[in-house]
Image: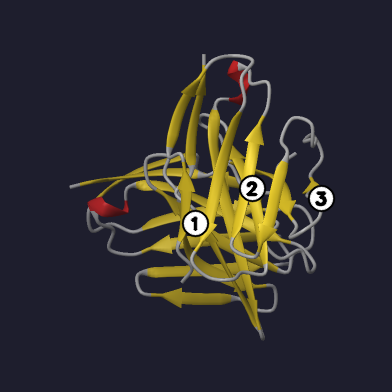
Amino acid sequence: SAVISQKPSRDICQRGTSLTIQCQVDSQVTMMFWYRQQPGQSLTLIATANQGSEATYESGFVIDKFPISRPNLTFSTLTVSNMSPEDSSIYLCSVVRVLAGADEQFFGPGTRLTVL
Amino acid sequence: SQQGEEDPQALSIQEGENATMNCSYKTSINNLQWYRQNSGRGLVHLILIRSNEREKHSGRLRVTLDTSKKSSSLLITASRAADTASYFCATVGGTSYGKLTFGQGTILTVHP
């Protein structure tokens, strides 16, 4: 299995500021994704982090609000910009390693963000 | 709207009993996966069933898939207090590896 770490594990931020979340994987993976889980809700895909190019965003999410980088096959960052209390959520990194005939998907431990 | 709908939203049982959770989805899928989440932490992948499979087992877990009804069920047999968690189904369509559409989840409480 892939070991995924996220930093920070949690943070409390002030309205209007930005936070960058890091995702590090212990081995090269094919695909990386960022998900959001709002309080008491299920998970929603924010975007696919593409190595060396712009991320692919899902409907309702834009690059100005959630800029994403993926400089190599094992690392990605998600920035939550100009935060408001509505951004309070758990943000999870997820990776897929596509193997012949199968694919394995793993989730990081999540970053719990509270915006005051 | 969310692809998956799960029922029940909450389930409370005694240790040793079986727990069954259901998931319905709306569009065609490549596979359906079940995940567990403890107390708002990261997700743990439990089992994956492909669209051409009807049933799959893993330890105390049994998953069924009925593509004609666009539904799946997760059965946990002989439940334990440690099984207390939220359980989510998630679907993948086509070749959209990793792009999961999650159901709303079932909160399972197993009383010792």
Read off the chain for label 1.
B
Q: Distance between the residues labelled 1 and 2?
A: 16 Å
Q: Distance between the residues labelled 3 and 1?
A: 29 Å
Q: Which amino acid does label 2 sit on?
A: Trp
Q: Position of residue A92 (x, y in %)?
A: 55, 46
Front tag of 1 and 2 = 2
Residue projecting furthest to the bottom: A100
- Secondary-structure class at tag 2: strand
Report which residue position mark 1 lands on: B35
Q: Pick whichever, B21 or A33, lies toward us.
A: A33
Front tag of 3 and 1 = 3
Report which residue position mark 2 lands on: A34
Q: Which amino acid does label 1 sit on?
A: Tyr
Front tag of 3 and 2 = 3
Q: Where is residue B89 in the image (x, y as percent from the top left)?
A: 57, 54
Q: Which residue is drawn at the image coordinates 52% and 29% (left, top)?
A: A39
